[in-house]
Amino acid sequence: MKGFLNRLRGVERDIIQMPVEDTAAGPYYEAQGNEIEIFEAAYKKRLPVMLKGPTGCGKTRFLEAMAWRLQRPLVTVSCHEDLTSSDLVGRFLLEGEQTVWQDGPLTRAVKAGAICYLDEIVEARTDSTVIIHPLTDHRRQLPLEKKGQEIEAHEDFMLVISYNPGYQTVLKDLKPSTKQRFIGIDFNYPNEDIERKILRNEVPELAEAQLAPLVAAGRRARTLKDHGLDEATSTRALVYAANMMAAGITPLEACKAALVSPVTDDPELAEALLEIIRAHFS
Amino acid sequence: MSSTEILAEIQQVLADLEKISFVAHRDTQSALGAIQPYGDETVLEWVKACKALFEHDRDAGKAFMRGSVAACGASNTVLPWTRQAMRFLAWRGSWKAVDGYMEQLPQAYRSLGFEGEVRWAELGLDWCERHLDSGVAYFRCPVLELEGGHGINGIEDVVLPSVELFGNRRLALGTYLSGAIRVRNLLGIEAVLPWAKRGADILQSGRLRGEAFFKLESEESMALLLENLPGFRIPEHQRLLQLVIYAWFGFNLDLLESKWSPDKGRAFVETDGVALYLPMALPDREEAMLAVLHATGHLKFHSYERRYIDALFRAAGREHPPLDAEQRITWRPLFAAYGDDMIRFQLIFDICEDTRVDEQIGRHIPNYRQRLLRAADAAAIVDGPAAAYFRWARDLLQWTIEGAPADPVFEPLRPLLSNDANIVDAFRIANELYKHTDLPAIALLARDQAFLPGRSPNAARPVYPRRMLDQAEFGTGLEDQEDVVKNQEIKPNPEQKQIPKHAAGEDPDFDIPPEETAGSGGRVGVGIPQPAHVLGYAKGAEYSEKGKPYAEWDYRDNRYKRNWAWVQEKTLTELDANEATRLLAQYAPALQRLKRAIQTQKPIRMAPLRRQFDGDELDLEASITYVVEKRAGMSPQANIYRQRVVQYRDTAVVLLADMSTSIMQACAEGGGKVVDRIRAAMLLFAESMEEVGDPYGLAGFASKYRDNVSYYTIKGFDETLTSHTRAVLGGLTGRLATRMGAAIRHAVASFDRAPSARRLLLILSDGRPADYDDGGDERYLHEDTRMAVKEAGDAGIHVFCITLDAAGSEYLPQIFGAGHYLVLDHINDLPKKLPEIYLRLRK
Ligand SMILES: Nc1ncnc2c1ncn2[C@@H]1O[C@H](COP(=O)(O)OP(=O)(O)O)[C@@H](O)[C@H]1O
Ligand SMILES: [Mg+2]
């Protein structure tokens, strides 16, 4: 499997890829609750899904794992404020004297029966979020306004969006009319046992004696979320810290680099976080 | 001289002495035995000195003779100090100096050595030469105190700065010395010189003030001392400690400054059951951390629970002591039974209870007990009875860390390690141990040294009994309260003045009946309640005069009460342009940084408008699309331009400030009142908004009863920021309570005039919604506010709350929703943070 993946590195690939049919190769995902069942049920009924939760808690990983499980290609679009509907749907291009229509990623997913993941959808302009409406109800259609056409979605197509209800998005919250079209799955940072398991799996080289305090420290650090931290310590950050430690950096330095300095510039808060880390590794 | 001649000479001198004074002769004779072993020549020189000194000044001579035996014993010499003593002959009336000199001489030899003694005497003799009284002060100062463990260098460092002070300012050594020694002892030798220099400046501005400074009698010298205390300085780390407490225990505590000063003994963290009292400084960071965690642990693990305190007194066979005037319990009666041996028992009891609590904390905080032990191992143990307690406590701690293996000595303490042990068990076990202990008797003075670093006397202060457990058993503790108010109509009720927590305090408006606060409102000047002109106002008058009514949500009936809260628009008439100017000057650097940040953000945020029908540049992407679509046979719209004009911004914001009484409180972080920061924050916000260019409004609100909610529009969307607006902000004061729901509804209505599509209501508050007539039912106005926020959302207005209440995260999520509030626990940051928060929100 590694060898196969390595051959793919640095090579252009089409965005629509069937998952590799190798049972050992599925992306590692540790379930936190019944999200897998919920997702599978939603998929069975082709209902669109909304993954809600803070950054770095495993939403993307979950979807990768689900796509692999359901053997569907996954198309991911990271949304940003300049993302227009043409970026999603497609546009005309010039080719010699001809004009040709080029499908956007959403259109391609709709045609190919892929899972289309619109990551951080609130970042996109509202006009781009409206075009997904007809895709999310019983119609399952994508209008191609420019071409004066519409597409019935492939029977396997599924739309998934993610969003992070943090305070930066207060003004950009999704319209209730958009939100209610989705099956919501709430994500949060996993519980302590699971978080340890995740780290053990992601960074197998990390010594067990360092793993437990790292996870405990990360969880403790999350309690300061409301006290000036915009983003709490994420599982991703813990994985980073674990990697740094496995690479030979001392726990304190690794945590400082992965858990403290990226999340705050406030010296007192940084001190408090360090105090927590120190206590665990003392 | 032959030896016989010498002997004859000695006899002669002695005979002369006898002629002069019987006492002198007798004293010389009695010391002679000690001198004789050093040989006749030495004896001769010594008796001559006796005579010379006696003739010079009788008292000097007597002091010399009487001190000789001890001096001889300490130095094993005679001549060096005899010759030193002879130098006092140079000054008239020097007997006091000789007296001090002879008295200190043995100690000088013992602690400074031979050379050190020479230097010591030299310094003193120089002072006699300079100013005899200073010389006296010098020699009278016990050598041990003077050197303070630093040897002769210590003496030089303390004394030399005063030479210059005397030269320039005629400051006598006597005025300076004891203060200087204390400063050196408290702050270390390096602190003496800066302290003396500061004192010299003060001396220049006035003799009395200067002398008071040097004697450490004045406030300013004490303050200077405290400011320079070495170690981990608590005031600078207040917030860190607060965050750490929150992280480990999940609650906030007030951290207050205790009245400790270094000469009152060891610095401890104490608690009164509600707040922690912290000294100005603790020896180091680790001890400070441990001490704060330990003291918080006492609160968390119920050392001060009401029921246990009751049980303690019962166990001690005493009546529950009456609470003091402040509803606190004093511990004294609990220990009275132990009479003179009280301290011994208290220490044993403290060790037992601390063992229990530290065990609990240890389950909670990894490595906590290990750190405690490490600190104890590193600490220097002070000899004396306290050392026995210290070692015992340390060994006991070690035993618990090792997992409490079978051990006959510590076995009786095992029950304290159980999860269900409480302070009563500690008391019981302490009493058992006390019966058989071989720990020494100990006096109060020695007690401080008995505690491991991080621990402290548990009964140091009277405590407010806690009621956490009572509440835990009944749920949140709010339920029974709710039962009381259930179905009881909440109505304006001037007789039954219920003062909500956050409305209480020094409230200049409180005594004005509600009828009088209505009208155009406000007061003139600060602190002088002055009813505004009330024209033809009476209860039951027209609605127009009562203001605008809004519905209020009653969660108990699950319905709205129509026309319930009445909001009156009022103008603030207290202007303070000077304050505004002062604040803007004070925050000028912060404002400048903000403006720069806003400008650098501008090009991104104010991106040129794309896809316009006209403009000065082509929108490349749009143009290509246009061409392509045209070729494809479509008829695209020609919106292919970009516009560089200042764009129509799409966010409008109202900043709504809670102006209740509580903002008049002093900042916990010190440096003025909360309102000062709110003024500055609103000013900075306004100035930043001018730079951002978004339409914005400023308003405040306060309330007293449901029919009297005041809404102060400080600046509307269509108004410009003027010096009048700034003066209003500069004169902002707090009054009355916080009926937030009504204020939100009114603010929402004000957005009718806002030009933008995205609308944000930013609430700045320092506490829960509460009013005088909510019957103490916190939930009532919480629920109403929650509904008001929901209504705002339905009206397309986002509500976001910024609070200064550290406990905000307990209730704000329910009211505003997760992610729709921010707890700012560093109030001094508010002015700078407020505009930043807005910028992040509008991104
Ligand atoms: N439940 C999980 N199972 C496996 N890995 C996880 C899980 N949750 C988090 N992770 C780790 O955290 C990282 C970040 O997760 P990601 O899915 O990118 O977060 P999100 O999409 O929510 O921002 C992943 O790369 C993975 O290492
Ligand atoms: Mg204690």
Image (spheres, rainbow, N blue to C red):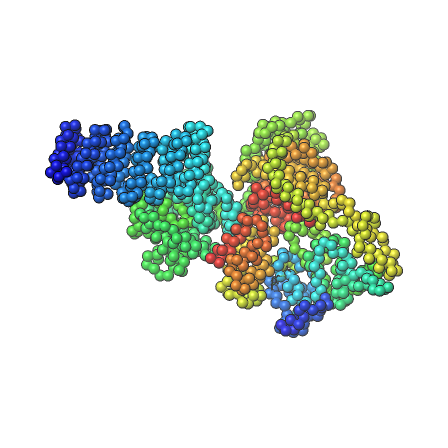
Q: Quadrant of residue B514?
A: top right
Residue drawn at the location 72% of the way across and 63% of the way down:
A116
Residue drawn at the location 33% of the way across and 57% of the way down:
B409
Q: Position of residue B285 (x, y in %)?
A: 46, 49
Q: Which of these two is toward me, B722 or B248?
A: B722
Q: Position of residue B707 (x, y in %)?
A: 65, 35
Q: Is residue B675 left or right of residue A74?
A: left
Residue drawn at the location 69% of the way across and 25% of the way down:
B536
Residue drawn at the location 36% of the way across and 50% of the way down:
B380
Q: Is residue A11 above or below residue B109?
A: below
Q: Is residue B672 above or below residue B620?
A: above
Residue B405 in view of the camera: yes
Q: Which of these two is toward me, B265 or B515?
A: B265
Q: Quadrant of residue B712?
A: top right
Residue B309 in view of the camera: no
Q: Is residue B406 above or below residue B174?
A: below
Q: Is residue B348 left or right of residue A174?
A: left
Q: Position of residue A155 (x, y in %)?
A: 76, 67
Residue at the far front: name it. B1
State which quarter of the image contains the N terminus of chain B. top left
Q: Is residue B445 left or right of residue A93?
A: left
Q: Which of these two is toward me, B392 or B830?
A: B830
